Image (cartoon, coloured by chain):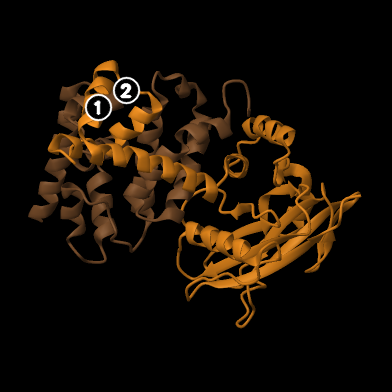
Chain colours: A orange, B brown
Amino acid sequence: MTSAAGSSVHDWELERYRLGELSREERERLDALFAADAGLRARLSSLDAADAALFQRCAPKVFAVQVAERLRTAGEVRRAHRVRLALAWSGAAAMVLLAVGLFLPLREALQPGDGDRIKGLRPHVLLFRKTADGAERLPPASLARTRDVIQVAYQAAGRGYGVIVSVDARGVVTRHLPATGAQAAPLRSGTVALPAAYQLDDAPQWECFYLVTANAPFDVANVVSATRRAASAASGKPPGRLELPAPLEQEIFVLRKAAQS
Amino acid sequence: MAEPGIDVEGLYQRYGPMVFRRCRQLLRDDDAAMDVAQDVFVQVLRRRESLREHYPSSLLYRIATNLSLNRIRDRARDPDLPGDALLDRVARHEDRDAPLLLQRLFGRHPESTRTMAVLHYVDGMTLDQVARECGLSVSGVRKRLRGLRGTLKAMEAL
């Protein structure tokens, strides 16, 4: 039976009750209500199932990796370094942000220009790999290795806004552009290198990059969730095209990963 | 452990469900809620010293509220706003300018005022509870909410 007093207990009170972060008086008040109110007890126990569903959806290790990636891509290099060390220790690191200066010559070479504003040209993502004496552009389906240092770049082909994400064979989605914020980044003309390079981790088989563009701002979260869904449905294979609403356009770049010796 | 005192996995296991549910309650979208929940933890890691608060759930709940409201603000043409009376009155203008109206309403007040409004009007916290959550006096909270209502009335009079 659900009482009026039980119904008046707010979700945030239940959350704190479970966390043991209520004052003694508040806790005793809720204890009394639980004893008398089956509906309230059911609300409380339903949270256990909700917790389990959440951890099924996003395991703590994966969540920690994704949070660390956001810290890194937001430019929190110094702090992220500590997190990265911890994640490497746990064997769960995804892609690792590297010092911004690594690809400076490449970025200088890729100055924005108007050369991509040609009608009919499609936006696309470009990948460069650091070499001993500079950088080499990687064609689609190139073979890459763990610890290769990769610079992501794009050509907007006149589109106004874009999002770049990648997903690996473990299903870990990494957001490259924009580093933060809920909306797609305004795109610049020319071949534009992102501000940071990445070192590939030991995720096996492949890494799939997506450039999603439109002429108006759109939600990054929709792209991220579509990528997760596609990776999940692909069962370990490169996921292919994302299910995205028009007028969003997408370009895919698959990088193959060499087997580790 | 990310560093001494900061265990992201442990924090997520303990507080992640509460944060996710809070984001989902305001955003009404699982994917958006998970996205914002990650931002909540990023912000907490940046402000790690604040985790020494006696009850970290208060801090996380407040950040989750604030970032979810930011996400709602950023939805350019999405009128799917939280269902409290204050916000609904604005949302019920039922035109494509709803986000602009919200921006005009909240843009004149500190972000913390917006969070207080949601804690009070949406979550049903008393002024005393909101004051404790936000580290202000009850009269300070009352003054902030009065100012917000004043802005809303002025907008409605236009």
Left or right: residue A162 compared with residue A166:
left
Q: Position of residue A144 (x, y in %)?
A: 83, 57
Mark 1 vs 2: CB contact within 8 A: yes
Q: Secondary structure at mark 1?
A: helix
Left or right: residue B125 compared with residue A179:
left
Question: Is there any visible trace of residue A130 in the rendered image?
Answer: yes
Where, by quadrant of the figure, is residue A155 drawn?
A: bottom right
Q: Secondary structure at mark 2?
A: loop
Q: Chain of mark 2?
A: A
- Same chain, labels 1 and 2: yes
Q: CA distance from mark 1 to mark 2?
A: 10 Å
Q: Position of residue A1 (x, y in %)?
A: 19, 41
Q: Residues within 10 Å of mark 1 (few under 14, many from 20)?
A: many
Residue B97 against residue B34 in the figure, above or below: below
Q: Amino acid at mark 1?
A: Leu
Residue position for label 2: A22
- Label of residue A30 in the image: 1
Q: Residue at x 78, y 54 (%)?
A: A204
Q: Quadrant of the C terminus of chain B?
A: bottom left
Question: Is there any visible trace of residue A189 in the rendered image?
Answer: no
Q: Quadrant of the N terminus of chain B?
A: top right
Q: Residue at x 81, y 63 (%)?
A: A138
The residue sitting at the left extreme is B157
Residue in front for this viewpoint, B104 or B149: B149
Q: Position of residue B32 (x, y in %)?
A: 44, 53
Residue in front for this viewpoint, A11 or A47: A47
Left or right: residue A155 compared with residue B79:
right
Q: Residue at x 20, y 48 (%)?
A: B84
Where, by quadrant of the figure, is residue A163 drawn?
A: bottom right
